[in-house]
Image: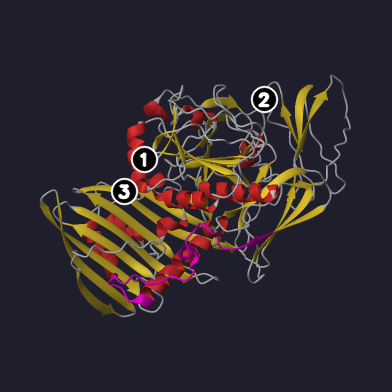
Amino acid sequence: MTARSIGPIRRAGIQARSDSRGNARLQLVPGEYKLITEPQPNQPFYFQSEQFFVKEQHGSVQHTVKLRPAATVILKAVDAQTGQPIPGVRFNYESHDASDPRPVSTQSVYVDYPKTNTAGEIQAFMTPGQRRFVVAEPLTLAQAEGSRGELIKLPAGEVTTVEFKLSQPQFVDAETFREEVKPNPDSIYPPELQLKWHRQSELLRGSSMRVTAQLMLGRQPGLDTKDLLKDLRALDPYQIPDIDALLKKHGGEIKRGGRTIMTSTGQFHKEERLYEWRKHLHDAQGRLLPDSISFRDGWETLTYDASNNQASVYRRNFLHIHTPNDFTNWPTLRFQCPAPEDRPRPEVKIEQSGRRTIYTTQTDSESQGQKLTYLQRRVFDRDTGFIFESYLEEPKLDVERVSLAFAPQKQNNGLLLPRFYMSWQRYRGRLNLVQIFEIEKVELFDQLPPDAFAVAIPPGAVFVDSRHLSPEASRTRPGRPYTTTLRGPVTDFAAYLQRHPRHTPKIEQQVHYGRPAPEIKPVSWMTREGVSAPPDTKGKVVLIEFWGTHCGPCISQLPEVRTAARYYADQPFVLIGMHDSHTSVAELQEFAQKEELDFQLAIDRPSTRKGFFGETIRNFNVRGIPSAAVIDQQGNVAYVGYFSEALKTVDRLLKEKK
């Protein structure tokens, strides 16, 4: 129970946990509060708040809070062909009147990003209401047929099971869904070694873990890395080196950065830093409070710094968050670029040293008329493939990149992690960065605890919200973050942000599903033959593709757009390729003839506000292209977002009509 003051900020007596009899004792001065109830993750209730007044009086006052039962949802993912459960699937949900997807959580207090278990299931306690569930990860399944559910009602106190039968989508190449990987034929390393590295890369990517390490960061301008490297190479790589003695010997400084706690699963990463030079605080339960917390979900970055009591959220990833990827170097086969035919194979020297294999290569290249020679060295365990050293040097540019791992330790799931890792970079003789990880503890989880990614914030913190600003806001137009002061403690920053939508200027158009679509009024309607009349959209499903000929991803998506136009040609359906305002009829006509675009085209009007590609595009609240929008037979917005999801919406609307 938390009493968040409406007036002056209160810090003492405002929070308590109920005992076995359901009683929680708060000590409040007279005034107005928002009384917040947060059930335990395993309790079938949901987050709720109410206004609460404390009058001028003495003694105790009893107030009863009736917990409201949550809707219990069981999400199931199965293979449409075999009926087998699919583990590792993550879901988003949409409400009946909002297009922004939100991650499904197992409860309503924390945002915990759960995945389906070995039975292919997730159980979640959710706020009752209408919801649509959508597969979010992995990407191949997010594009699968059946990945977008219907809008359903979730009754309070009842269990609702939603099953997703997933199969390959008709608009995506079958090669995308190939699970097995093939070694790179252009690689200098044996195929079996490439597969070992790839398996470790996938284990690292798929593991849910918490790693505690001592971290040392700094530039170390006086450090003699040449001699240090010789000494490190001479050590037993299966043991932890005495780094303090080595730094002292070679002119370095012992700069302890403190402890870092890294929590990771997939694209979700959280780092808690406890700096050695700061005085540490403890919470009411006696737990040590971190000096700073950072969290990234692949889209937004959340931070809290105790030194200035500021909580911030950004829609960009300019802040580096340390993750287990920072002290591992596992090559992956997920992305392979074929080597140019005219590139000569590098000279390779292979040596054996005990249990280790050493690959040394020399590659000649040319840059801006200057001939360069790159020397590379990689040392790995012959049996496990564990990489002890990755080294790159170019003598003319005085470039040096070094990473060294010691004391490999095999985790319960087979993942290999070092207990000590050191790396540095040198460019044109200047040592840019030295970082050292001394790993103290590794914890693996089948499913991370609900509060694993929680960023707790105390009352009185300054809240800086930059979600409404684009990453280029400072260069393209004036932009100011929204700033306020948090009146009470926040249990989880991400959950707080979900309950408090981003600050939006009044001028920005908001699009809601099920409501009339904005007017489609371009500067010119046309086809590949030239200027044309507007299409007849009455009673039809309309798919708008927002794009531009200058946009690489837009051009890459054109084959899918052409396929969709032909596939639905005999249906009550209209596809409109809405080009941004930065083109002419002649230019677009020439491009359409060259690319054989046989669907309706249009050129948007210039936007009345900076930061958008056109006025129609702005009215649909689309800031990036390519994007798509779907309008149903009644002229209401049915979807705004990715083209692949738009196609599924079109298919559903056409089938409903039949």
Q: At 38% from the left edge and 62% from the top edge, which residue is drawn? A: 329
Percent across and percent down for residue 122 are: 69, 58
Helix or strand or loop: what does disc 3 sit on? Answer: strand
First-in-chain label (2 vs 3): 2
Kind of residue at disc 3: Leu
The quarter holding residue 436 reads bottom left
- Of 257 and 139, which appears nearest the observer? 139
The quarter holding residue 119 reads bottom right
Q: At 66% from the left edge and 27% from the top edge, which residue is drawn? A: 487
How far apart, in angstroms, are the residues tagged by discs 2 and 3? 42 Å
Kind of residue at disc 2: Ile
Whether residue 181 appears in magenta in the rendering, the answer is: yes
How far apart, in angstroms, are the residues tagged by discs 2 and 1? 54 Å
Q: Is residue 54 left or right of residue 145?
A: right
Mark 2 and mark 1 residues within 8 Å of each other at the beta carbon: no
- Of 513 and 610, which appears nearest the observer? 513
- Give the residue pinned by disc 1: 549
The magenta stretch is 164-192
- Give the residue pinned by disc 2: 9
- Of 310 and 572, which appears nearest the observer? 572
Would residue 291 be seen by someone viewing this image from the given angle? no
Identify the image quadrant of the N terminus: top right
Task: Specify the label residue 412 is tagged with.
Answer: none
Kind of residue at disc 1: Thr
First-in-chain label (3 vs 1): 3
Helix or strand or loop: what does disc 1 sit on? Answer: loop
How far apart, in angstroms, are the residues tagged by discs 3 and 1? 41 Å
Q: Residues within 10 Å of mark 3 (few under 14, many from 20)?
A: some
Percent across and percent down for residue 272 are: 52, 47
- Give the residue pinned by disc 3: 433
Q: At 44% from the left edge and 45% from the top edge, which residue is drawn? A: 598
Would residue 511 be seen by someone viewing this image from the given angle? yes
